[in-house]
Amino acid sequence: MPTALEASGALLPLVVPRTFRCAGRVTPDAPPVGLAAILAAVLTISAHVPSSARTAEALGTQREGTGIVIDEDGLVLTIGYLIVEAETVSLLTGHGVRVPAHVVGYDHETGFGLVRANRPLDVAPLAIGDSDLLLRREPVVLVSAGGPGAVTGGHVVSRREFAGYWEYLLPNAIFTTPPHDNWAGAALIGRDGKLAGVGSLMVNNALPEDRPLPGNMFVPISALAPVLGDLVAHGRPLRRQRPWLGLFAAESLGRLVVTRVSPDAPAEAAGVRAGDVVLSVGGAPVNSLREFLRRLWSMGDAGVDVQLSVLSETAVREVTVRSGSRLDYLQTFGRTARPS
């Protein structure tokens, strides 16, 4: 029987050099390694989030997914929603060893999260590839925690912008098919055996223009390098913080409808409610999530006043929202680093 790697068309044997620059350190070169080493670098990550956390209701208090070892000192990359606001974190190796860990950093703009093992993992890190070279029709391998049974083959079906209802806009996201069931934090491996992306979502529209096709959305690994140093040193990126309102919105029949408002968030304080239709931002009409987010972020940094025109039932209201910073809204538990 062919392996998932062979079925995907990936080159065998996979060559995974152990040279990777991380926060100013470069690990030494080592002989090429193959699938066994890739599996060893993909771990189960478990996080406990207190019920008082901002994200507890939406994301739960017990979260589990996949983490990827990316340096010699036990730094593990995952998708951020697994570990944001976590109080405790642990890693489960492929040998069944449970290792305590702590949150290092979280970046909402990319979606990445980092944790570090509290003791040596004795695992070679997975080499970082170049996701910009991962084009449509390219064969890939999707690897989640759980050993060889969690390895599936697939291919890239599109590269495009992704807008999320939680005030999230990801340029050049990677969409693959067939879908991988354990997508949260899964490693996307290119034909060179290197890490090309981190699993974020299951989607029904992997093809462009919302054409129906089930698949997964991956955050491209190229987005990691610009924020890695800040995340390791400070727990968050030190770039300017975008204005954040705390509203969840969905496109419906050419309108942008508010589906939920985060408790104690700027939108709630300004009186925005679920069911409102956002008509304009700063006087500019918006009909899609992309238009809404681009217009919102063009108005300045976090803290700027944002003028919204919203349709509430049959009446149009003008609302001024004093925007905030999402990272300041989230609570910090455990050993997450914060900037001084």
Image (tube, rainbow, N blue to C red):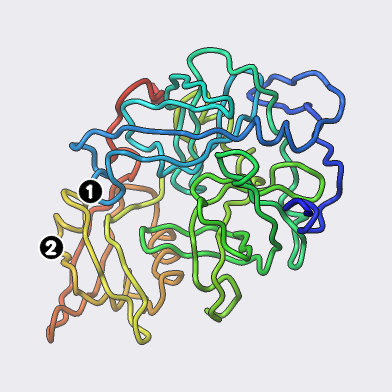
- Which badge, 2 or 1, comes first in the chain's sequence? 1
Residue 51 percent across, percent down from the top left: 19, 37
Would you identify the image quadrant in which residue 291 lies? bottom left
Residue nearer the viewer, 157 or 299: 157
User: Which residue, given by chain and number where applicable, does mark 2 sit on?
Assistant: 271
Answer few, some or many: residues within 10 Å of disc 2's Cα (few below 14, many 20 plus, some between 14 and 19). Answer: few
Residue nearer the viewer, 38 or 270: 38
Count of marks placed on residues: 2
User: Which residue, given by chain and number where applicable, does mark 1 sit on?
Assistant: 57
Residue 87 percent across, percent down from the top left: 31, 27
Query: For the C terminus, which image quadrant?
Result: top left
Would you place residue 22 above or below residue 149 in this image? above
Would you identify the image quadrant in which residue 68 lies? top right
SS class, disc 2: loop
Would you place residue 173 above or below residue 103 in this image? below
In the displayed image of the protein, which residue is found farthest to the front?
1
Q: Residue at x 69, y 42 (%)?
A: 195
Residue 335 percent across, percent down from the top left: 37, 20
> How many angstroms separate mark 2 from mark 1 (CA)?
21 Å
Q: Residue at x 69, y 63 (%)?
A: 156
Left or right of 315: which side holds 30?
right
Answer few, some or many: residues within 10 Å of disc 1's Cα (few below 14, many 20 plus, some between 14 and 19). Answer: few
Residue 144 percent across, percent down from the top left: 57, 44
What's the residue type where badge 2 is placed? Gly
SS class, disc 1: helix
Q: Residue at x 42, y 27 (%)?
A: 103
Would you place residue 166 above or below residue 193 in this image? below
Left or right of 313: which side holds 163?
right
Number of the front mark, 2 or 1: 1
What's the residue type where badge 1 is placed? Glu
